[in-house]
């Protein structure tokens, strides 16, 4: 008889997104993303970080201060990195699992690539104009939104 306590697809893919977030060097917000085909195959992953070739040690990570002294003009979000990390093929009808609801800039990229569903862990910026714009665009474009419902399952990694 097969075991019955295996991970669901949602647990598995959200777990990959959360694990990917652990690669972020950002001391305040770590975000991960996992893009999955409609056949439940992982197409790409990403996390928030500086662009390739820009030193994590030399770039600013501050949240406040003069614009060019903060992370905001420089950091690539997890969703965009996952989209750009895709080596080949289409993302049409794929799902993206993200640990934080996408901003308006990432929403545009998600829509443009044909991703059809966003499964998100947290929506802590729901009241910001950027997230409101994201939701407006997702609704207009027919992108399905679904908040991940955590289970009581605990997964421990010892590295």
Image (spheres, rainbow, N blue to C red):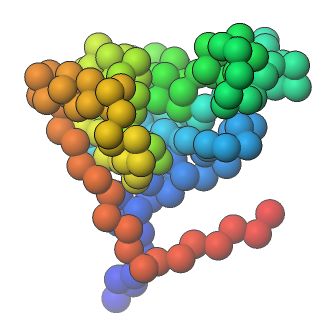
**Near-viewer residue (140 or 153):** 140
Residue 117 visible in the picture: yes
Residue 21 vertical position relative to residue 150 in the rendered view, above or below: above
Residue name at image x 24 percent, y 49 percent: 146
In the rendered image, residue 111, in percent from the top left (x then y), is placed at: 27, 20
Q: Tell me: 138 left or right of 150.
A: left
The picture quadrant where one finds residue 32 is: top right
Residue name at image x 42 percent, y 79 percent: 152
In the rendered image, residue 80, in percent from the top left (x then y), is placed at: 49, 22
Residue 153 vertical position relative to residue 56 in the rendered view, above or below: below
Is the N terminus in the top left, top right, bottom left or bottom right quadrant? bottom left
In the rendered image, residue 107, in percent from the top left (x then y), is placed at: 33, 24
The picture quadrant where one finds residue 54 is: top right
Residue name at image x 33 percent, y 42 percent: 126
**Near-viewer residue (136 or 4):** 136
In the rendered image, residue 88, in percent from the top left (x then y), is placed at: 46, 17
């Amino acid at each position: 008889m097969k075991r019955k306590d295996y991970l669901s697809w949602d647990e598995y893919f959200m777990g990959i997104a959360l694990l990917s977030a652990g690669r972020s060097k950002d001391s305040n917000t770590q975000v991960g993303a996992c893009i999955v085909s409609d056949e439940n195959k992982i197409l790409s992953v990403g996390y928030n970080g500086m662009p390739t070739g820009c030193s994590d040690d030399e770039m600013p990570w501050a949240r406040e201060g003069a614009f060019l002294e903060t992370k905001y003009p420089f950091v690539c979000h997890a969703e965009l990195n996952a989209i750009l990390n895709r080596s080949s093929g289409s993302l049409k009808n794929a799902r993206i699992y993200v640990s934080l609801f996408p901003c308006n800039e990432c929403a545009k990229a998600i829509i443009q690539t044909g991703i059809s569903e966003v499964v998100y862990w947290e929506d802590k910026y729901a009241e910001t104009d950027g997230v409101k714009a994201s939701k407006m665009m997702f609704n207009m474009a027919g992108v399905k939104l679904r908040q991940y419902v955590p289970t009581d399952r605990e997964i421990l990694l010892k590295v």
